[in-house]
Amino acid sequence: MSFLQIEPVRILLYLVGICAFVGANAAYLVLAERKGAGRIQRRPGPNEAGFGGILQPVADGIKLLAKQVMVPPGTDALLFRAAPLMVMAPPLMCLAMIPFSDSIVARHLNVGLLFVFSFGSINVMALMLGGWASRNKFAIISSARVVSQNVAYEIPMLLVVITLLMVTGTMDLNEIIHQQGGGIWHWNLFKVWVNPLMPVTFVIFFICMLAETNRAPFDMAEAESELVAGAFTEYGGMGFGVFFMAEYANIVVGCSLATVLFLGGWQSPIGVLSGGLWGAGWFLLKLYGLIFTVIWIRWTFPRTQFYSLLNLSWKILIPISLFTLLLTGAMMKLPVVYHQFF
């Protein structure tokens, strides 16, 4: 056995790699977002630090590190300091389950999907504690919005996931990807013979992912025009920076999960060149395509009202996702009923 195959060494290397991956994404997705916003709004965007603004994330990181992290008087100091750690830990744990190719995965579990959703739900608790511990009226209002929004949108998201579990019959993320091999028409997104509304389930999942990560047009937790900076109002320096990193880490996790569940993961759309580094390349191509869509939506659609946000989930998404769940169950039973009676 080689040194790199020793289990503690392998886990340590994957941990360092995941942290580096999250840090690089947090830094340069901010730059990509600011550049994309500039392009959409017909302005240059950041272009002073380095060639074309390429060093802007480095300058921002140095600025945040140079600022003193202060605990305002009257706050719950322990929870105030713990909230940034709690918000950063879940996406790191979730990324350990994501298979970036057939051989690149930090930890393989046969219940990986359950693991991801279990740790993903901790994010809302961290935001709630950060806002409540701040003893700031804007942060407390933001915390209430975060809880309401996440409760509303986790229901249709889980209904969509249950629909996929009925189709795949497994919670193993690797197995879900293997079942989508053979080309683009075998991806769950296009399995209309199982459920003609499969593309609709993908749209519902994507909308719920935007709401779960508090992204525009569902960023009611941070609505700057109403709540200053929301749950992060009292945070400065790297305290604020960690919340910012966690937001982009959650976007990476959400888009990675959408890639695994609907877009074939590391499987090639042409049915060949799916293994090893080719698979990782396909995965990253799909992942960043979805992230670009997330950024595009933020700078294209206006922020919705809070009650419209909740109505969208309770009155539209939940009934549709329930219908797709029942339709999938009915279509999967049709062959059994046909053979039994005919």
Image (spheres, helix red, strand yellow):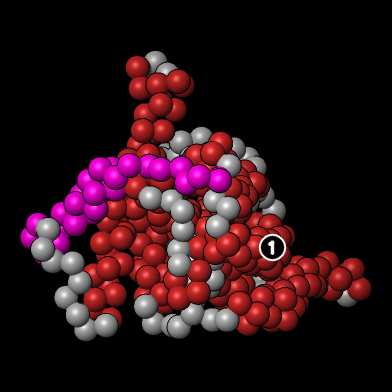
Rendered residue at 60%/73% (across/down): 204
Q: Quick check: 204 above or below 262? A: below
The residue identified by callout 1 is: 151
Which of the pair 97/145 is nearer the observer?
Answer: 145
Can the viewer see residue 184?
no
Q: Residue furthest front?
A: 73
Q: Amino acid at mark 1?
A: Val
Quadrant of the rendered image containing residue 325 = bottom right
Quadrant of the rendered image containing residue 190 = bottom right
Residue 65 within the magenta-colored segment of the rendering = yes
Is the C terminus in the top left, top right, bottom left or bottom right quadrant? Answer: bottom right
Q: Residue furthest right?
A: 341
Q: Position of residue 229 (x, y in %)?
A: 45, 63
Image-based side of 264 in relation to 124, left or right: left
Q: Position of residue 21 (x, y in %)?
A: 34, 45
Can the viewer see residue 307?
yes
Which of the pair 320/20 is nearer the observer?
Answer: 20
Rendered residue at 33%/42% (across/down): 68
Range covered by the magenta-colored residues: 50-75
Q: Position of residue 185 (x, y in %)?
A: 50, 70
Which of the pair 33/293 is nearer the observer?
Answer: 33
Image-based side of 273 in relation to 106, left or right: left
Which of the pair 284/77 is nearer the observer?
Answer: 77
Q: Position of residue 318 (x, y in %)?
A: 72, 74
Is the N terminus in the top left, top right, bottom left or bottom right quadrant? Answer: top left
The count of marks equals: 1
Q: Quick check: 266 above or below 187? A: above
- Mark 1, secondary structure of its residue: helix
